[in-house]
Image (cartoon, grey):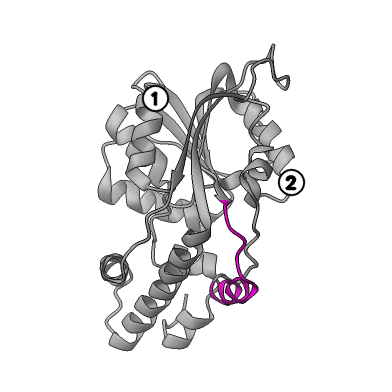
Amino acid sequence: MGKITVEFIKNMNYPDFVWFINQWNVPPWAYDTLSRWINYWKINKESNILEVACTTWFSIREICNITKASWLWFDLSDKAIENAIYNKEKYTNWLNLDFIQADWYKFDNKWKKYSHVIVWGALKFFPDPEKMKNRIIDFLEDGWLILASPFYWVWNMPKELIEKAKKVFGFTITSEPYKEIMKLYNKFEIICEERKKLELETDEEIKYYCKSTIDLAIKKLWIEDSKVYDAMYNRLYEVKNMSNELRKFQEYSILILRYRKNIYPNRLVELF
């Protein structure tokens, strides 16, 4: 990695910064969403779960910690795998786990199917979301479930905020309404859905989160330079503050979707 300097922190792209500080990537409302997934369809020790491309594997780690389900965690990034292993050993070293680093589109899945596949809102982040959806079906047991929590937009975001967000995240935020987002999901049977508003964080809450995350990061990375600490803290604060601004225009949905081979992709039940 070389010497860690203030310039190194400032010039790092957003995904690498998230990896570097080992930021726990969580679905909207974090534990609350996981609890709804667990309780609405009773995930238990008999369940076997696959999580797709969700960086530090927060969701599946915490679900399996509660339910003792078995699972597989899947990502293309070797950096994500590295952090996943670190977090497992540090926070839940009693769990049995499998990691696979591979291209999701190319991975040969002849050996196992899963009762639940967790995607959060990640389908939209793949180059070909429809192809990705078909690959998920390849991994899913007939009659079982996809767990998702996609964001959607309820207000048009001002152009100046879009430009500001691009500077923070390094990519353009796209604004899609509920019906557009749901096109990826509504050919499955919608077993359960909750549409939720977002509560904005206070500045005090954001600062506390940033301090907690960066305090752990510098211990993991053996960083003692106070200027580097400040650069890491300030960048995470900027990210969190921008995310908070975006939440003013967003809501999200907690989804439990069922795939049945003899029905999909037909819709035989009305949406209302």
x 29%, y 65%: residue: 209
154 in the magenta segment = yes
The residue that mark 1 highlights is 40
Q: Amino acid at mark 1?
A: Tyr
Image location of residue 127, percent across then percent down: 72, 51
Image location of residue 142, percent across then percent down: 60, 16
Crowding at dot 2, Cα within 10 Å, few <14 / some 14-19 / many 20+, comes out as few
Foreground disc of the pair 1, 2: 1
Q: Amino acid at mark 2?
A: Asp
The residue that mark 2 highlights is 128
Per the rendering, the mark at residue 159 is none
The segment highlighted magenta reads 153-168
The quadrant in which residue 206 appears is bottom left
Task: Establish if 128 lies above or below 173.
Answer: above
- Is residue 109 visible in the rendered structure shown here? no
Assign a secondary structure to mark 2.
loop
- Residue sticking out furthest to the top: 262
Of 175 and 34, nearer the camera is 175
